[in-house]
Image (cartoon, coloured by chain):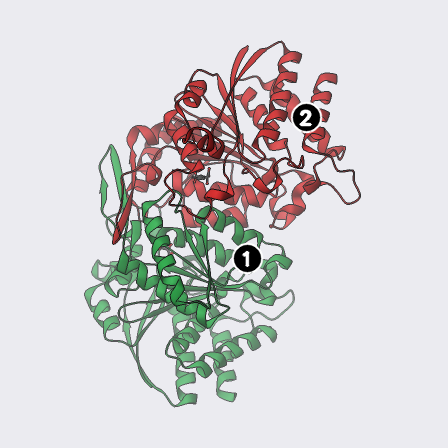
Chain colours: A red, B green
Amino acid sequence: MDFKIAVLAGDGIGPEISVQGVDVMNAICEKFGHKVSYEYAICGADAIDKVGDPFPEMTFQACKHADAVLFSAVGDPKFDNDPTAKVRPEQGLLAMRKKLGLFANIRPVQTFKCLLHKSPLRAELVENADFICIRELTGGMYFGEKYQDNDKAYDTNMYTRPEIERILKVAFEYAMKRRKHLTVVDKANVLASSRLWRQIAQEMAPQYPEVTTDYMFVDNAAMKMLQDPCFFDVMVTENTFGDILTDEGSVISGSMGLLPSASTGESTPVFEPIHGSWPQAKGLNIANPLAQILSVAMLFEYFDLKEEGALIRKAVDASLDENVRTPEIQVEGGAKYGTKEVGAWIVDYIKKA
Amino acid sequence: MDFKIAVLAGDGIGPEISVQGVDVMNAICEKFGHKVSYEYAICGADAIDKVGDPFPEMTFQACKHADAVLFSAVGDPKFDNDPTAKVRPEQGLLAMRKKLGLFANIRPVQTFKCLLHKSPLRAELVENADFICIRELTGGMYFGEKYQDNDKAYDTNMYTRPEIERILKVAFEYAMKRRKHLTVVDKANVLASSRLWRQIAQEMAPQYPEVTTDYMFVDNAAMKMLQDPCFFDVMVTENTFGDILTDEGSVISGSMGLLPSASTGESTPVFEPIHGSWPQAKGLNIANPLAQILSVAMLFEYFDLKEEGALIRKAVDASLDENVRTPEIQVEGGAKYGTKEVGAWIVDYIKKA
Ligand SMILES: CC(C)[C@H](C(=O)O)[C@@H](O)C(=O)O
Ligand SMILES: CC(C)[C@H](C(=O)O)[C@@H](O)C(=O)O
C-alpha cells in the first residue's frame, strides 16, 4: 500500500510517543514493502496556543486527505480548573470526531500478564479478560441540543435510526470476527433512546444468527465488568455510557498504559492510545510508547494487513518478556528504559524479524 | 417517638426480609420505649397482578401518611424480557420516587471484614473503603421530556437550580457530619447540565468552609472508585451517573447483599436494601435479611435516634462474628442459618442487650 498518514502529536507526552509510533510505522512499511508519507498537524492545547483553535481547519484538511490519522494525546493542566472556559483542548477532540464522522470508538480491553498486578481486580478474575468495547462517538448528549442559563440547563440524548444501525452493524461484525457474543448495553427500562437502541438491535440480530446477542442495563454492565469481565466478548453502547464503561474496562485490565484504540466512521480512521497527555512527564523520556505503538498495529489491521499488525504485537510482547520496559512497569531491579529506548528496541526487533 | 411505618414488601424475597425488618423495628421500639404501628401496602409486580398498577394510589396514600416507609424489593422475571412493556414493576419505583419527592438517594458503601473476599477488588485496596454516594433521584433523563418513534428517540437531561441546590445541600451536610470531603461528580467538559451543577456547587462551597470540595468527571470517578476507593468520603452526582456509580460502589465493597439505602426528600423517607427481589430464592428462607435490617438502622438514624441505630449495627456485627449467617456468606463448614433464624437471632440479641 501507499499510506498517507496525518500525524497529530498534540500535548504533553504526545510528541514523544508519536515519534515512536512513526518509527514503528516506517519499520513495518519498509519490511513489508509499503510506501508511507506523513503530514504533521497541530491540535489540542498546542493548537490553541498557536492559532486559537484546538482542531483548526488545516488540521482537519490534513486528516481528511489522509488514509489514517495517528493521534497521540491532548490536554494541558492550564485548562483543567475551568471546564467552562470558552476554548478547551477537549473541544478539539469532539470537533475531530464530528468532522471526520468518527462514530465508532473501538477499545480492546486486554490484559498483559506482566501488568496483572496493576489491576485493582483480583488477578484470577481478570487474567483471561479479552473484550472489545464499542462506543458510539458522535451522537447522544455529547452533540444533542444543549441549553444553559443561570437557573436551568439541559442536554438532549438524541439518536436517530441510521446512527444506531451503523454502530450496531460495526458491533455485530466485530462479534462475527471474534467469539460471536454481543452485549448491547442500554437503560431501556428508563430511557426512550435506549428503547429505540434495543428495538433496532432486536431487528438486526436475526441477520447475524451465529451471534449470541444479549441485552444488559448499564448499571448491571458496570457491575458485571467487575464481577465477571470474562463474560464479555463485544460490548456496544451509546456515547455517554461508553465514556464511563470504556474507562472502567481499561482500568480493570491493569494495562491502561498499554491499550490502543481506533475511531472509525465516515472518513479517515484515527488510531490513538487510550491514555492522556500526562503533562507532568513531558520531555522526561519516561512515557511508555507501547499504547501508541499498538495503535499502529490497529491501523494495519484496519486495512486488513494482519501480518503487519501481528509483527508489531509480537515485538511488543517480546519487549515485555525481555524486560525492556519503561519505569512504571519495570520489575524491581530491572534496567529502566526510556521512551526512545523502548521504541528503538521494537524497531530493531521488527527489522531483524 | 410514635412511629407510623408503611411497609412495602413487594416481590420475590421482599416479603421474607420485610418481616425481619419489622421484627427488628419492634424489638428496638420496645427496648427504647417508642410506639410503632404499621400499614401494609402493595407495590411492584405484586400490585400489577392485583390492581394493574405497580404503585397504586392507596399505596401512595399509605406512604404519604406514614413517618417512614420500610421498602423491600420489586421485580419479577416475567417482566424482564420486555423492557418496553406498558406496565412494569420498575415504574412503581419511579412513581414512588416522584410522588414522594424522594430527590436524595443515600447509599453508604461500606465493607464488612468477613465479606472482603467477595469483593472483586484486591482486599488491600478496598478494606478501608467507607464512603457515601448521594444520587439525585427525581431529575435528569429519568424524568425529562422523552420522545420515541420508529426513526428517532430522545431523552432530556434537564436540571433546574432548585433541584441542584437541594441535593447539593444534602451532600454538603453529609460531608460536614463525616470526614468533610465532598466530591462532586459531573461531565462539565461536555454537558451543559453538568456545568450548571458545577457552577452551583462552586457558589455553595464557601458556605461550608470546613469541607474540602473537589470536582471529578464521571469517567474519572468510575476509575478512581476502583483504583483508590478510600479517596472518597461523600460523593454526589445526578440521577443517571448515580445509577451507574452507586452500583459500581456497592459491588466493590463485596458487601452488596448487606447494604441498605435511604431515599429522602420532600415527604416520607424510604428505607430499603440496595439488592433486588431475587425471585429464584423466593420462599426458600435463604435470603440474607441484613440489608433490610440495616435499613431499619438508617431509619432510626434519620430521626436522630443514634443509639437505636447503633444497637442494630452492633447486633448485625455480632451475628457475623458469631457466624450466624445465611448460606451465601457462611464460612466453610459453618452452620447455615435461614432468613428467619438470622432475624430471630438479632431480635434476641437486641432484647438481651
Ligand atoms: C475529554 C472528553 C471530552 C472525552 C470524552 O468524554 O469523550 C474523553 O473522556 C474520552 O473518553 O475520550
Ligand atoms: C430499576 C431501575 C429503574 C432503577 C434505576 O435505574 O433507578 C434501579 O436500577 C435503581 O438504581 O434503583
Examine the image and state in which quarter residue B202 appears.
bottom left
The subunit letter for the residue under badge 1 reads: B
Work out whether B194 lies above or below A5: below
User: Can you see residue A261?
Assistant: yes
Work out whether A257 lies above or below A40: below
Relative to residue B331, is residue B342 drawn left or right? Answer: left
Ligand 1 placement by image quarter: top left
Choose between A274 and A209: the one closer to the eye: A274
Could you say where residue B174 lies in the image, as x and y percent from the top left?
42, 68
The quadrant of the rendering that contains the N terminus of chain A is top right
Residue lying at the far front of the rendered structure: A50
Measuring 25% from the left and 34% from the top, which residue is drawn there? B152
Q: Give SS at disc 1.
A: helix
Residue at numbered disc 1:
B229
Work out whether B243 lies above or below A94: below
The quadrant of the rendering that contains the C terminus of chain A is top right
Choose between B36 and B286: the one closer to the eye: B36
Q: Which three-letter amino acid code belongs to the residue tagged 2?
A: Lys
Measuring 70% from the left and 37% from the top, which residue is drawn there? A326
Residue at numbered disc 2:
A314
Residue lying at the far left of the rendered structure: B57
Residue lying at the far right of the rendered structure: A333
